[in-house]
């Protein structure tokens, strides 16, 4: 349990309390303007409310975390003895067979635009004077605009061609025009660049969990890193320059162990640049942050003395686990494996399926996406699971961290022909993970120019196996490094697209998919409401 909660997070909670007590039976989710008389003291709460949508967009059921991880070569949700088939919803994500009606397509869109709308609402209230702000008005407006840009970063990444909405007070019947992916990219860059000067340079304290200067530079770096995907034009040097701003600040450094970054009480982690704050005493939405419930088996309740029995679904793709060096500490810190014990040290047993009554020991095997037993697949364990944890974890979720900034710079150097310089940075990131074999931490430029060690190809009992390997992946070794460092952080889809393997390779129960699947479709429900929206290329214009 965290011993402290930031003033900013308390502000968010205060807003929720105001909503529930002031509006009585008329509305339980909206602020009715004619019934709300804001004061300057409400400002922190109102700004904080615009951040909440990032948490919902990232971690709520079948949202960003799901599409980023389960559509990739790292994680899968196979059918389990207790279900997890759910009408094929998870399998469709893994196989890249989603339609425009799929839950994940709608959820990501709705959560992200809810964030945009919240930013626009608070901006309107401040700029119109309905919220009386004198001190810090310019800074608050800048922060909200950069926060709004961060939602558009993810909309640009997932959907590409989306409407840019900057107004809250729009006329009745208004439907926005659709912008191109390039226009959305340019909008994000402009909004962040123009408002950077007004953001706080402070780290931690009241700035924790908010967009300050360094979070803004990290966001710019992320946009520049993916510029070639988003616009067709690479911007590697611009990415390096943005990373150098964060590096040169001297405010961040790698933590002694990677585990420190994902501990329950990780708010003081040295490398966190921007995180979503969590505390299970205050953030109580059912799916607020429940990855431990989604990955552990029911018997694991006794391992951590959990308040509820886990549901046992998501696990690692075995081929991905096979890429790890056996001396890489991340293999053991990030993935729950082997015999499962109670908190008292007793061996746990399977409780369902064909292996009921046999030892619960997670193995790096999964028969297929259609069927598995409790023992199949290493489980997600990167975020510390606290003894006595509830359905919601209390770990803060880092969206930007220093290791990511270092690796963004390294990749940009590599792609500009400076492989040896890139290798020095990669070695720095690896050092903490090979303390027992420090010689293995060193990487050379020549190694980064090699292909991937991932053994791609179909590997399940549904069809004959195929063997594609990864030697043909340009800079594949660097993609491997990203996988080893950033698994379970809701980003693998993005990295795979940038390295050209997301739709071209097979793995586990996944066959290569159509190239247009690198973008999600515009949800059918949105196109039915807005005739200005044209479907993304490749997807049927009738919505399928």
Image (cartoon, rainbow, N blue to C red):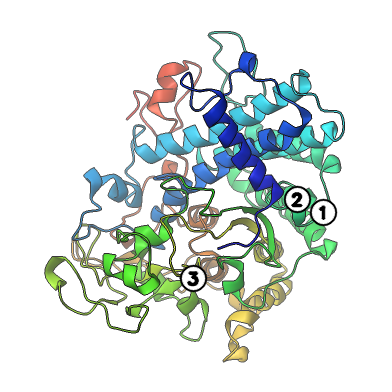
Q: Choose the circle earlier in sequence order: 2 or 1.
A: 1
Location of residue 410 by image quarter = bottom right
Find disc 1 in the rendering and name its residue. 202
| Other-residue count near label 3 (Cα within 10 Å), few / some / many at <14 / 14–19 / ≥20 | many
Element type at marker 2? Answer: helix
Q: Nearer the viewer, mark 3 or mark 2?
A: 2
Question: Does the CB distance between marks 3 and 2 fall below 8 Å?
Answer: no
> Residue drawn 64% across and 84% down?
442
The residue depicted at 19 percent of the width and 69 percent of the height is 351
Quadrant occupied by the C terminus: top left
For marks 3 and 2, give the CA distance: 39 Å
The residue identified by callout 2 is: 207
Residue 59: x and y, percent? Answer: 47, 48
Callout 1 secondary element:
loop
Residue at 66 percent of width and 39 percent of height: 48
User: Camera-side residue: 84 or 520?
Assistant: 84
Q: Farthest residue in the top direction?
A: 172
Q: Residues within 10 Å of mark 1 (few under 14, many from 20)?
A: few
- The numbered mark at residue 507 is none
In the depicted structure, whether residue 241 falls above or below residue 541: below
| Residue 401 in sight | yes
Identify the residue at the far left of this view: 354
Q: Which residue is mark 3?
A: 452
Question: What is the quadrant of residue 409 in the picture?
Answer: bottom right
Horizontal and vertical percent position of residue 253: 74, 70
State how far apart marks 3 and 1 are (Cα): 39 Å
**Chain-order first, disc 3 or disc 1:** 1
CB contact under 8 Å: marks 2 and 1: yes
């Amino acid at each position: 349990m965290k011993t402290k909660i930031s003033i900013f997070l308390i502000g968010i909670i205060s807003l929720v309390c105001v909503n529930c007590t002031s509006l009585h039976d008329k509305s339980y989710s909206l602020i009715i303007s004619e019934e709300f008389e804001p004061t300057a003291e409400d400002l922190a709460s109102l700004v904080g409310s615009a951040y909440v949508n990032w948490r919902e967009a990232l971690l709520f059921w079948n949202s960003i975390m799901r599409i980023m991880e389960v559509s990739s070569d790292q994680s899968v949700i196979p059918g389990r003895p207790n279900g997890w088939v759910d009408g094929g919803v998870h399998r469709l994500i893994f196989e890249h067979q989603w339609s425009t009606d799929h839950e994940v397509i709608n959820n990501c869109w709705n959560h992200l635009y809810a964030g945009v709308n919240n930013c626009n609402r608070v901006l309107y209230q401040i700029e119109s004077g309905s919220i009386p702000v004198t001190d810090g008005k310019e800074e608050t407006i800048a922060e909200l605009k950069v926060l709004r840009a961060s939602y558009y970063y993810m909309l640009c990444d997932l959907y590409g061609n989306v409407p840019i909405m900057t107004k809250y007070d729009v006329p009745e019947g208004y439907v926005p025009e659709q912008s191109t992916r390039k226009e959305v990219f340019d909008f994000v860059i402009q909004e962040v660049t123009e408002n950077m000067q007004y953001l706080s340079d402070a780290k931690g304290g009241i700035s924790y969990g908010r967009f300050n200067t360094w979070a803004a530079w990290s966001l710019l770096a992320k946009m520049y890193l993916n510029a070639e995907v988003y616009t067709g034009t690479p911007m590697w040097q611009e990415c390096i320059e943005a990373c150098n701003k964060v590096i040169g600040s001297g405010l961040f450094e790698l933590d002694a162990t990677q585990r420190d970054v994902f501990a329950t009480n990780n708010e003081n982690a040295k490398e966190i640049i921007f995180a979503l704050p969590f505390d299970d005493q205050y953030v109580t939405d059912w799916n607020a942050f429940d990855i431990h419930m989604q990955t552990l088996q029911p018997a694991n309740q006794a391992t951590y003395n959990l308040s509820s029995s886990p549901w046992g679904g998501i696990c690692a793709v075995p081929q991905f686990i096979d890429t790890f060096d056996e001396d890489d500490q991340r293999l053991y810190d990030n993935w729950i494996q082997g015999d499962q014990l109670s908190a008292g040290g007793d061996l746990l047993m399977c409780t369902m399926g064909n292996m009921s009554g046999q030892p619960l020991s997670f193995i790096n095997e999964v028969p297929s996406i259609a069927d598995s037993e409790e023992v199949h697949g290493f489980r997600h364990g990167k975020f510390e699971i606290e003894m006595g944890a509830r359905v919601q974890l209390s770990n803060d979720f880092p969206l930007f961290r220093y290791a990511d900034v270092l690796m963004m710079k390294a990749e940009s150097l590599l792609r500009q022909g400076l492989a040896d310089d890139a290798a020095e940075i990669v070695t720095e990131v690896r050092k903490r993970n090979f303390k027992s074999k420090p010689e293995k931490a060193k990487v050379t430029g020549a190694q980064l120019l090699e292909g991937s060690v991932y053994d791609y190809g179909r590997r399940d009992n549904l069809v004959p196996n195929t063997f594609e390997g990864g030697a043909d992946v340009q800079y594949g070794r660097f993609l491997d490094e990203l996988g080893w460092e950033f698994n379970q952080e809701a980003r693998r889809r993005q990295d795979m697209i940038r390295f050209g393997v997301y739709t071209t390779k097979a793995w586990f129960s996944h066959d290569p998919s159509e190239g247009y699947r690198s973008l999600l479709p515009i949800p059918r429900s949105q196109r039915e409401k807005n005739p200005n929206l044209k479907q993304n290329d490749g997807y049927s214009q009738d919505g399928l």
